[in-house]
Amino acid sequence: MIYTVECSFADPAYEKEWNDFYSLEKLPALISVSGFHTSQRFKALSATCPVYLAVHSIDDMAVLESDEYQQKGGGNFARWQQHIIDWHRNLYGGVERAPAIGEGEYLLLSEVGAEPLIDMGLTPVWMRAAALEKCPENRWLARLDRTFPLSMNRLAAGVHLYAPLTAQLTGNSCAKAPAMEPHQHA
């Protein structure tokens, strides 16, 4: 399942420090939770959605209800909570693992169907909300190469573009989030 966390941060004076906390402490703590398989953070390039997105591959809802998840900071942002706005959490089925989005790629998320992504020549993956807010109920995700001639003005309403802030962490990742590296194609 795919667990998404979206939010914006209301205090620009502390935003860099918060991002360091999230990328270097919180993400590695979450990926160490039993049942978490991948974690990656993104920043929206679209203006009509929360600024930050974290995408995690997990086993199921029980992972988010576990004591281990709570003990390792799941569901809260510690001292940063007061600055978090537009916070949304969803659990989606239909995808077992989130794709790793490399430095030379973007993540596209559509709330309005697969067609806008297909029209761009992409192969979207459908996700259906299974728990938490369940809004939007359906999403489609796709990987986009940064060399694609993209105009932000031409993205359909309800399609959001994200750049990776971190490399994708896996359950085998070390304690600190690695710097972004170019995506390796198999």
Image: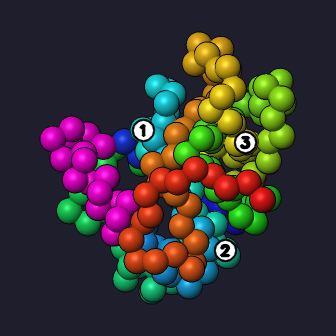
Q: Quadrant of the N terminus?
A: bottom right
Q: Nearer the viewer, mark 1 or mark 2?
A: 1
The answer to whether any part of residue 60 appears in the image is: yes
User: Circle 3 — which element?
Assistant: strand
Earlier along the polypeptide chain: callout 1 or callout 3? 1
Image coordinates of residue 124 in percent, x first then y, are 80, 41
Query: In the rendered structure, which segment of residues is drawn in magenta?
Result: 9-25
Mark 3 residue crowding within 10 angstroms, few (<14) / some (14–19) / many (20+): many
Earlier along the polypeptide chain: callout 2 or callout 3? 2
Residue tagged 3:
142
Q: Nearer the viewer, mark 2 or mark 3?
A: 3
Mark 1 residue crowding within 10 angstroms, few (<14) / some (14–19) / many (20+): some
Earlier along the polypeptide chain: callout 1 or callout 2? 1
CA distance separating discs 1 and 3: 18 Å
Identify which residue is drawn at 73% across, 54% down: 185
**Residue 61 versus residue 49 in the image, above or below:** below
Image coordinates of residue 137 in percent, x first then y, are 69, 46
CA distance separating discs 1 and 2: 26 Å
User: Circle 1 — which element?
Assistant: loop
Q: Nearer the viewer, mark 1 or mark 3?
A: 3
Main secondary structure found in the magenta portion:
helix
Type of amino acid at the residue the image marks with label 2: Asp
Question: Which dot marks residue 51?
Answer: 1
Residue tagged 2:
60
Pick the residue in front: 5 or 46.
46
